[in-house]
Image (spheres, coloured by chain):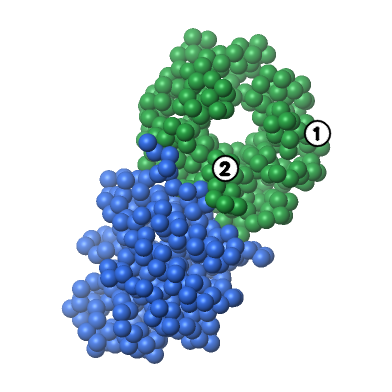
Chain colours: A green, B blue
Amino acid sequence: MSDLPKFVELHEEGPREGFQIEKKHYPIEQRAALVEAIAEAGVKKIQVGSYVSPRAVPTMADSGDLFKIIKRKEDVRYTLLWLNEKGFQQAYDTPGISLDPKLLFYTTDEFSQRNNNCTAAEMRERQKGWLDAYQAKGLGVESAYIVTAFGCNFEGHVSIKAVTDNVQWILDTFAERDLSLPNIILADTVGWANPQEVKRRIGAVREMIPDARIGMHIHDTRGAGIANFVAAMEMGVDLFEGSVAGLGGCPFAGHGDFNAAGNVCTEDMAFIAQEMGIETGIDLDKLIDAARLAEEIIGRPLNGRVMHSGSLDKFKR
Amino acid sequence: MSDLPKFVELHEEGPREGFQIEKKHYPIEQRAALVEAIAEAGVKKIQVGSYVSPRAVPTMADSGDLFKIIKRKEDVRYTLLWLNEKGFQQAYDTPGISLDPKLLFYTTDEFSQRNNNCTAAEMRERQKGWLDAYQAKGLGVESAYIVTAFGCNFEGHVSIKAVTDNVQWILDTFAERDLSLPNIILADTVGWANPQEVKRRIGAVREMIPDARIGMHIHDTRGAGIANFVAAMEMGVDLFEGSVAGLGGCPFAGHGDFNAAGNVCTEDMAFIAQEMGIETGIDLDKLIDAARLAEEIIGRPLNGRVMHSGSLDKFKR
């Protein structure tokens, strides 16, 4: 376990991922209070909502208003998701938003077709348009996401080559434009990863780009979320995205009335990192308070574990 | 990951651990149906109930009647827990029960005092009485449990020495009596373990007894259950106890109305083992059916993950 990082950065996506899948709309005052509680716990980057089509995601239509009422901390980056130029322009025009531009890459044509109405290769070419748009405004790309990097519900197994081909495209394209490499985020979008595959795929990407920062966007759909988090840390990965209280769910998987679990739980990651002696900069008990607030707002038991049992701090002498 | 076993054995404790903590009593017909569903999925050892004081654990008072109505499979071991001589005699007198005698060891005096009204050292000496009782009936000890092997809610940190001292006592005592060593089960009774400590403690025990079989009894109190399962497999451990659907809870930890999570979820272990190419002998989809039956019986959402999302088999081509 010699590659374990000394510090891991945990980014929060719960305020968007958690509330966007709910049928009910939650008032911006409640969502702002949650964002503030997460920031209070020491999380340095929080996705608060999205500028996407209000017809497609009505629960996020008031994201701009939400952002305005948040009492912001200076050292925290607050982001909003966008998927088209209009959304990007809205974000660009919102003072105080941290833009942190992203690129999105797909590993299978069918998943890309359903999400973007184009093949994975066409989606790659589209990213050049985003690069142009960001460069035109003098913005660097913060992160490149490899979506469904571990498996796809439509095409099944995803080869390591499907992942590394995207990474090679990124390497080539950024070299052509003389841009510095973004963080490479492997996303287990639909919960296919296991610790062995995490190590294999991160190893393959690391070999191609020894100096780039690698991150993971983990879903806990099948209970392997924290195990995958640990496996990634053992490969030196130090950047993760999660949802407080395990907020969110997976619309692609579910049984009867129960939503399948969604994003891996942020405070469960913070807990296990802390127990393994890895710093996160997070005050765990405050993040547990934020998770309990999320549960109170949503109004039903959420998936987080340590929020229901408490940390171990009070037992340690 | 070269020490990964080719096969891991998963034992089921849900029918006891799950139902004993419930306030409500569940009819034996429902519990028998659950035991049968678990056996149908290929689990080879199932703890169906306990012969303990009906005053202390009223929900288990009918364990003998439950056992009688179970349609048993020949290759499955059905066990009942006992904690005193009367319970042992009841089990001994129950035809068809697999006795699988256990010994129990404690790492801290206060946890032992509260559970057994004696110190950890006194508890060790008491195990000689059990050894006598088992030897008198010609029974070997199947497993020796090191309870709270990772931490204690009363005394806090548990040293590795507190674990290995118990193992040394077992080694010495079994050598004196010329008995073959039992399985050594490290139990994370109150959810303190993390993957690093799992590796350290299993490594320390393995070093003392390279040939003994080591197992783990894992609780998922703080969300690290599956990560600890993977860490133990990476140390070559091939014997685990879990609860279908994550049945059960931890009476020592909890927040408000929510019980903290209890035993690690059996089918989530089976899922991740299968995905890592490790055999379990379990038909995952049938075990998911058993987990859904457990949820139907209990009547509220349970903690298992893969039971709510389904396995990946249907997506693989």
The kind of secondary structure element at disc 2 is strand
The three-letter code of the residue at mark 1 reads: Asp
Whether A283 is drawn above or below A197: the answer is below
Tell me the chain of label 1.
A
Residue at position x 44%, y 69% in the image: B33
Badge 2 and badge 1 both on one subunit: yes
Q: Specify whether A94 is left or right of A42.
A: right
Q: Point out residue A114 in the picture as x, y percentages from the top left corner.
A: 55, 28
Mark in the foreground, 2 or 1: 2
Q: Which quarter of the image is occupied by the N terminus of chain B?
A: top left
Q: Say few, some or many: other residues with alpha carbon within 10 Å of mark 2 (under 14 / 14 to 19 / 20 or more).
A: many
Q: Is residue A119 above or below residue B243?
A: above
Q: Which residue sits at x=54%, y=75%?
A: B26
Near-viewer residue (B251 or B197) = B251
Amino acid under disc 2: Cys
Q: Mark 2 = which residue?
A: A250
Residue located at (41% from left, 83% from top): B64
